[in-house]
Amino acid sequence: MDVKVSKYDRCQEEIYKIIRIFNWVFYVKQKIMEITAPNTITKDFDQLVIHLERNHTCVLRLTHKLASYKYEPRNYECFIQLRDLRSGLQVLAEDQMQLFDSIQHRDTSLENARKDINRILRRFRELESVMTAYILEAKNC
């Protein structure tokens, strides 16, 4: 008994095969995402830690630079600026270390850590501009 299969039936079978393959690919993709999702979060935290470490190194360099005899204050205004600048850098370094610890211990979420790092970077840029103004003023005194 030969049963003739119509073109419509063959197309329908091919469509079902494609749908099964598509479902299998989708399932495998979901499983891969479930497995790699924690790794991407760890990678993001690691990138934040590296970024914070680099910024902290810059703060330490600026602090060391301010301790140089080249930038000693020559008048009262420069002395006040230098004192404010040193205290600002010290507070920034302490905040960086606290954030670094909270990121290392996973005490904060990824979004909160990013917000804190952006806040610290803004403060760093402000202090950097104040330091540039101080250095220019100290050279002119």
Image: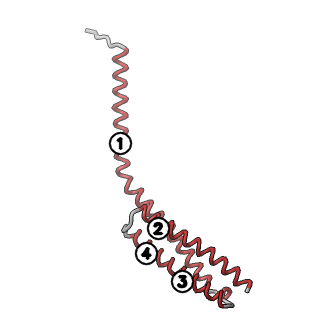
- Residue carrying label 2: 116
Q: Residues within 10 Å of mark 3 (few under 14, many from 20)?
A: few
Marks 3 and 2 close (CB-CB < 8 Å): no
Q: State how far apart marks 3 and 1 are (Cα).
A: 55 Å
Which is nearer the N-term, disc 1 or disc 2? 1
Q: State how far apart marks 3 and 2 are (Cα).
A: 20 Å
Q: State how far apart marks 1 and 4 are (Cα).
A: 41 Å
Check the image and report above or below for 36 versus 23.
Answer: below
Q: State how far apart marks 1 and 2 are (Cα).
A: 36 Å
Q: If the image is split into quadrants, where does the C terminus sit?
A: bottom right
- Residue carrying label 1: 28
Q: Which mark is residue 87?
A: 3
Q: Which of label 1 and label 4 is nearer to you?
A: 4
Which is nearer the N-term, disc 4 or disc 2? 4
Does dot 3 land on a helix, a strand or a loop? Answer: helix
Give the image location of residue 112, x and y in percent: 42, 64
Question: Which is more toward the observer, 24 or 78?
Answer: 78
